Image (spheres, rainbow, N blue to C red):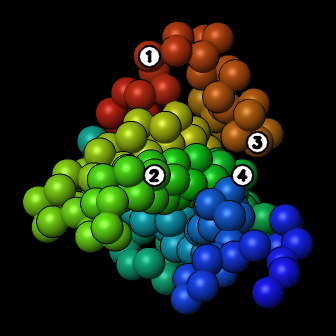
Amino acid sequence: MATSAGAASVPGKPKTSPKSVKFLFGGLAGMAATVFVQPLDLVKNRMQLSGEGAKTREYKTSLHAVGSILRQEGLRGIYTGLSAGLLRQATYTTTRLGIYTVLFERLTGPDGTPPGFLLKALIGMTAGATGAFVGTPAEVALIRMTADGRLPPEQRRGYSNVFNALLRITREEGIPTLWRVGGAG
């Protein structure tokens, strides 16, 4: 049986997509979900910040928050920070999936035996921690961008997009600020 050099395949082994395509699709799936989740993330962030340092909360319920944001900022206001949410997914999700896949494959036995439970847990923790580190600057920008609309007009930062936010945070406050807990400040 003759086969061409480029068409050789391993019998019994199903064809799979290249890793880069899997990472791309994973990141794109996370980004697509963000388009739908962003208004909820905005409301969550605003509600968390609304009672900070005040005796009464700015928003009574989630619906009250949505109504207030729509009245004060319009329909675009509900998507404030979308570029940061998309970057967060692109960085966090693809990094996490990529590291998990690479480590899992490298630690799979030569006979195809997958790693044991503890090793899988360690792989997952490593992938999650690395993804979180890589995605945190976008998360800081997201918190800043979503919090901006609740600040008095003279205190608003007015970030135009995530890259503007990251650049200004770096220039005005230094690179370590991109990994600071409590990034809304």
Instruction: Determine whether the residue tagged by mark 1 lies in a helix, strand or loop.
Output: helix
User: What distance separates the C-alpha of mark 4 from that of mark 2?
Assistant: 28 Å
Nearer the observer: mark 4 or 2; the answer is 2
Q: Are marks 1 and 3 in contact (CB under 8 Å)?
A: no
Q: Which residue is mark 3?
A: 161
Residue at image location 84% in from the left, 78% down from the top: 3
Residue under label 4, please give it.
Answer: 83
Q: For this rendering, which residue is in front, 23 or 108?
A: 108
- Cα distance between the residues tagged 2 and 1: 29 Å
Q: Are marks 3 and 4 in contact (CB under 8 Å)?
A: yes
CA gap between label 2 and label 3 equals 32 Å
Q: Choose mark 1 or mark 3, whichever is in front.
A: 1
Q: Earlier in the sequence, mark 2 or mark 1?
A: 2
Q: At 50% from the left edge and 65% from the top edge, which residue is drawn?
A: 41
Report helix, strand or loop for mark 4: helix
> Residue type at mark 1?
Pro
Q: Residue at x 66, y 80 (%)?
A: 15
**How far apart are the two marked residues, 1 and 3, measured between alpha carbons?**
20 Å
* First in residue order: circle 4 vs circle 2: 4
The circle drawn on residue 176 is: 1
Residue 18 visible to the viewer: yes
- Which of the two discs, 2 and 3, labels the residue nearer the N terminus? 2
Amino acid, disc 4: Ser
Residue at numbered disc 2: 102
Examine the image and state in which quarter residue 50 appears.
bottom left
In the image, 104: left or right of 170?
Answer: left
**Does label 3 or label 4 sit earlier along the sequence?**
4
